[in-house]
Image (tube, rainbow, N blue to C red):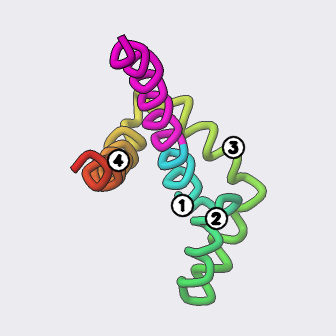
Amino acid sequence: LIDIILAMFLIPLGKMLVASVFINVLLMLFNLLPIPPLDGGRIAVGLLPYQQARTLSGLEPYGMMIVIILIAFDGQLQIMSTFFWPLVNLAMMAILSGTLG
């Protein structure tokens, strides 16, 4: 009886934990996209040569619009699903392989 009660609480708790890790990995990798208002854009500006960094910095006022367009038109452009989701899956496998044995 105690095993059943524990399973009723532990299984949903485990699923909730995996979902929260997935959301955090998703947000982390999304934030690393090299688009200027995101942190990845700031990293790219710091790593690029001066002229290219200046050009990329000039996109900052339009950065959120670029992000919205990427998300809205991903079905047609296949940019996010080609590059972003494989990284999310790789990160999740790396994290969960350490926790699941």
Kindly indicate whether the residue at mark 3 contacts the one at mark 4 (C-beta within 8 angstroms).
Answer: no
The first of marks 4 and 3 along the sequence is: 3
User: To which residue does mark 1 refer?
Assistant: 32
Residue 65 bears which disc, if any?
Answer: 3
- Please check the rendered image and state whether residue 16 is part of the magenta-colored stretch, yes or no: yes
Q: Nearer the viewer, residue 20 or 28?
A: 20
Three-letter residue code for mark 4: Met
Local SS, label 1: loop
Can you tell which quarter of the image residue 55 is in? bottom right
Q: Which residues are magenta?
A: 1-23
Three-letter residue code for mark 3: Met
Kindly indicate whether the residue at mark 4 contacts the one at mark 1 (C-beta within 8 angstroms).
Answer: no
User: To which residue does mark 2 refer?
Assistant: 39
Categorize mark 2 by other alpha carbons within 10 Å: few (<14), some (14-19), many (20+): some
Local SS, label 3: helix
Can you tell which quarter of the image residue 10 is in? top left
Report how far apart the C-alphas of labels 4 and 3 lie in the structure. Answer: 28 Å
Categorize mark 1 by other alpha carbons within 10 Å: few (<14), some (14-19), many (20+): some
Q: What residue occupies the far left of the structure in this picture?
A: 101
